Amino acid sequence: MSPRHGSPYVFDPGTLCLEFLVTGGPGAYAVHESLHEPRDLADWCTRFRLRLDPELVTVSGAELAAARTLRDALWRTVLAHLDGRPLPPEDVAEVNRAAARAPLAPRMGTDRECAWVVPADATAVLSTIARDAVELLTGPLADRIRECGSEDCRLVFVDTSRPGRRRWCSMDRCGNRQKVRALRARREAEDPA
């Protein structure tokens, strides 16, 4: 990721649906909006897990609006899950609507790599994202969804570490900054001058 302040860092949220959340969102997340026009969604499909050729993904204006609607519903659903609140019925319905459509079709290459049958439309991309969300929120990793432990970071990820104690979106960024804060606090406590 390339934050407005600081140097770029690697952030792997662990799943496609959580990767989609970094494109913006409702409320405080709106400042991070990156899906301004259909081309932005096609470009997003190239940079993350899907690795689709943007020339082979068609995105209409209606599909771009549907992408933002799905993403916002995913944010509210994930945050409710993290807070232990009931999932918002209207947002669950939005995720289910998207998941009910035909997803991207996977294919295996001779190099044993998974790829996608293309060309594809954004509706299939959104269905694939929504199905990933359904699997995550109803599956064994649901209790491993975490929000970054940094005071000034709200990124969400799946903790796939063996002990299940990951606290930071990225050790390169938030984890390192927290270590520096803790070191400064210890030094200040040792040297009260």
Image (tube, rainbow, N blue to C red):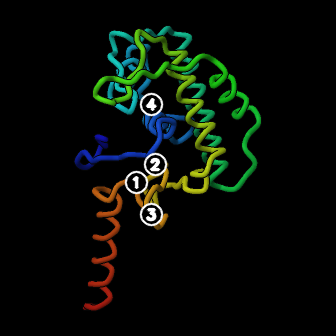
N-terminal-most mark, 2 or 4: 4
Where 165 falls versus 31 (above or below)?
below
- Assign a secondary structure to mark 4: loop
Marks 2 and 1 sit apart, C-alpha to C-alpha, by 6 Å
Give me the residue at 54% from left, 14% from top. 63
N-terminal-most mark, 1 or 3: 3
Marks 2 and 4 sit apart, C-alpha to C-alpha, by 14 Å
Marks 3 and 2 sit apart, C-alpha to C-alpha, by 20 Å
User: Which numbered disc, 2 or 4, marks the residue closer to the eye?
Assistant: 2
Which residue is under mark 3? Answer: 162
What's under tag 2, amino acid-wise? Leu
- Assign a secondary structure to mark 1: loop
Marks 3 and 4 sit apart, C-alpha to C-alpha, by 33 Å
What's under tag 3, amino acid-wise? Arg
N-terminal-most mark, 3 or 2: 2
* Residue 128 coordinates in the image, percent (x, y): 53, 26
User: Which numbered disc, 3 or 2, marks the residue closer to the eye?
Assistant: 3
Is there a contact, CB below 8 Å, between mark 4 and mark 1? no
- Assign a secondary structure to mark 3: loop
Badge 3 density bin: few <14, some 14–19, many ≥20, Cα 10 Å: few
Which residue is under mark 1? Answer: 169
**Residue 155 tag number:** 2
What's under tag 4, amino acid-wise? Glu
N-terminal-most mark, 2 or 1: 2
User: Which numbered disc, 3 or 4, marks the residue closer to the eye?
Assistant: 3
Marks 1 and 3 sit apart, C-alpha to C-alpha, by 16 Å
Quarter of image, res 181: bottom left
User: Which numbered disc, 4 or 1, marks the residue closer to the eye?
Assistant: 1
Which residue is under mark 4? Answer: 33
Badge 2 density bin: few <14, some 14–19, many ≥20, Cα 10 Å: many
